[in-house]
Amino acid sequence: MDLGLKDKVILITGGTKGIGGAISKAVARENAIPVFVGRGEASGNEMLETFKANGINAHFIQANLNEEGQCKRIVDEVLETFGKIDALVNNAGANDSVGLEAGNPKKFANSVFNNLNHYYEMAHYCLPALKKSKGNILNISSKVALVGQGGTSGYAASKGAQLSLTREWAAELLPYNIRVNAILPAEVMTPLYKSWLDSFDDPEEKLKNITRNIPMGNRMTSDTEIADLAAFILSEKSGHTTAQWFSPDGGYVHLDRSLT
Ligand code: NAP
């Protein structure tokens, strides 16, 4: 199926690695122009070179989304380079283990700022361009927003807020025909996931315990499975889909435990 994404400019925060990296590749396969943001210069440039070598139009912006002024600078650079933005994927984030017991108010506030603030800032600065393009916004949240995890209050609060903002922005942006949706990944092997797994004494055993509870196939979701859904939601094939929370997780969050 042709998703009709050809030459659409799609801005992906954290689009250099992991789930965001897979979304950059998925939209590039559909002949869209991925513009990906990351802090690491090397990983961003490496991805850009690979795209260029394959004749794909793409753009990398090195930035830390949590530094003042960076979100506006990113949006300005995209508009100077391409003159439009067709979609925003808010994706960058980190499960930073700031818990209720093992945390403190300052760490909590920092975690919420780091995981949530740039979702708002990016949407805010992209809005004039999205109004022109009748574009859309996709927020990458987490299953943690629905089921908790323990020991990660700041991340959980941010992921829950991203779901609320998906509904709130979908309502506010109805008059402009701008769709807003969210994906809630559960268990996807990425650099972030691997470093979390490695924090356990026996990562292999921990992984076995997780996958045995994933109803469909007792396996992790691949980053491509998340990214292909993202590409479909971003496309006009999903033209009447807004305010939705998608859980591509093999039934992990919604199916009866007795089915695993
Ligand atoms: P990841 O492997 O760590 O990749 C994160 C990406 O974001 C990288 O490109 C990283 O590049 C960039 N990034 C992080 N912080 C940034 C910042 N402050 N400024 C600019 N770029 C930044 O993470 P992931 O596992 O793919 O997670 C992506 C999203 O999915 C997150 O919102 C996460 O909460 C969500 N999620 C993931 C899972 C999972 O199983 N993996 C489950 C639920 C939800 P640099 O490091 O170079 O900056």
Image (spheres, rainbow, N blue to C red):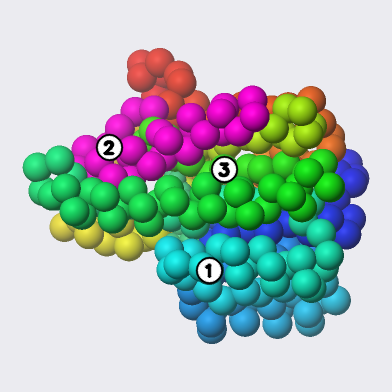
Task: Give the quadrant of the C terminus.
Answer: top left
Q: Ligand 1 near label 1 (Cβ, under 8 Å)?
A: yes
Decide whether residue 251 is among the magenta residues.
Answer: no
Q: Position of residue 151 (x, y in %)?
A: 19, 43
Q: Which residues are magenta?
A: 146-172
Q: Position of residue 219 (x, y in %)?
A: 46, 41
User: Quadrant of residue 212 in the image?
Assistant: top left
Residue that label 1 marks: 70
Which dot, 2 or 1, sits closer to the camera?
1
Q: Ligand 1 near label 3 (Cβ, under 8 Å)?
A: no
Residue that label 2 marks: 149
Q: Is residue 99 visible?
A: yes
The residue nearer to you, when weighing 176 against 212, is 176
Identified at 20% across, 54% down, the residue is 107
User: For the residue labelled by badge 2, is the local secondary structure a helix, a strand or a loop?
Assistant: loop
Q: Is residue 223 visible?
A: no
Decide whether residue 170 is among the magenta residues.
Answer: yes
Q: Amino acid at mark 3?
A: Asn
Task: Give the quadrant of the N terminus.
Answer: top right
Residue that label 3 marks: 139
User: For the residue labelled by badge 1, is the local secondary structure a helix, a strand or a loop?
Assistant: helix
Residue at mark 3 to residue at mark 2: CA–CA distance: 20 Å
